Image (tube, helix red, strand yellow):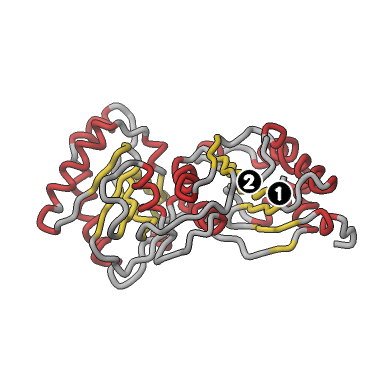
Amino acid sequence: MKSLQLLITLHAGKEKILDFARHSAPSLIKLLRRGLHVTPESSLVGTICQACEIKRQQDWPLAAICATADGIQGASSGYWLRIDPVHLEVVMGGLLLRAPASLQLSQPEADALIADINHHWLAQKLRIVAAHPSRWYLHLSAPPILHTTPLDQMCGEYLTPNLPRGADARLFLHRINEVQMLMHSHPVNLAREDSGRPAVNGLWLWGGGKLSAGKPVLDLIAADEFDLQALAHHIGSKVAPAPQAFAELEHNGRVLVALAQSEADSAGDLSDRLAQLEQDWFRPVLRQLAWGGIRQVRLDLIGQFAVTLSPGRLWRFWR
């Protein structure tokens, strides 16, 4: 294999990861000790955009790429933002966000909410479009001065420090607050609450930008998330589901594998997850690297560590 970039999401801090890894994932410790450390990107979206050589605009421009993959008309022109439906949960210390996938929103529910939001925004000439109940888009004719936080970065994070920034942020937050009040008493949400399901009481802006050209810098992207698969299609890479283990990965080119962690998984035992990753990934990758079966490895523990290794670097025992 020419190269492997392994992206792993662990919703835990550096010290906690290292502490558990010393007992559950000794191969990870060896990879981190002997690798050349580089500055990690704080989000999964940002990490894979860098790997695909997609340049950052005001944001990582994922909205336009995903809108194209979703078949949204006019996705190739203008400025696009994701404006995804979320649940905002009041906890001690502030508001936490629950991602769209956890809501299991149906298409009729999404259509009803979007129709009333668009009616409310008629005078402002804003319109949400969606081809999937959990992926909503906002098209603007000109770029706003707005910097946002990727949705995948919000698991377990408070809202306030991650709200949009920039000269136009206050305007967009005001617009969103207005429709969130509308959503509060919406028949869709009343029905969801009556059946014990979380309300769709928030919208999350992120991924703003214009569609840019892609080039085939990777031969295979193995990932389960739609956003990452959309990026693969955009750069002309082969797409596959994320394999359960390194042994299932059959490709000799430039490969990126993304092993994301869902909100449900993040509540589990970190020691168990690291032990499974040790067996399925860290140990076999380390072995293949030592034998020369992989020429180059980059390991990204999203937001925490990023290292690159070659077979020669792995034999630096003094590190």
Classed neighbour count for the residue bearing mark 2: other residues with Cα under 10 Å, few (<14), some (14–19), many (≥20): many
> Can you say which quadrant of the picture contains the C terminus?
bottom right
Dot 1 or dot 2, earlier in sequence: 1
Q: In the rendered view, would you say 316 is above or below 20?
A: below
Identify residue type, mark 2: Val
Classed neighbour count for the residue bearing mark 1: other residues with Cα under 10 Å, few (<14), some (14–19), many (≥20): some
Give the CA separation, mark 1 to mark 2.
8 Å
Left or right, residue 147 beside residue 125: right
**Image coordinates for residue 205, horizontal then vertical, percent:** 34, 55
**Image coordinates for residue 316, horizontal then vertical, percent:** 87, 60
Check residue 255 in the rendering and tell me which mark sits there, or answer none: 2
**Image coordinates for residue 248, horizontal then vertical, percent:** 68, 32
Q: Which of the 4 image quarters holds residue 106?
A: top left
Q: Residue at x 21, y 40 (%)?
A: 113
Q: Residue at x 74, y 40 (%)?
A: 278
Q: Which of the 4 image quarters holds residue 281?
A: top right
Q: Residue furthest left?
A: 123
Q: In the rendered view, would you say 241 is above or below 22?
A: above
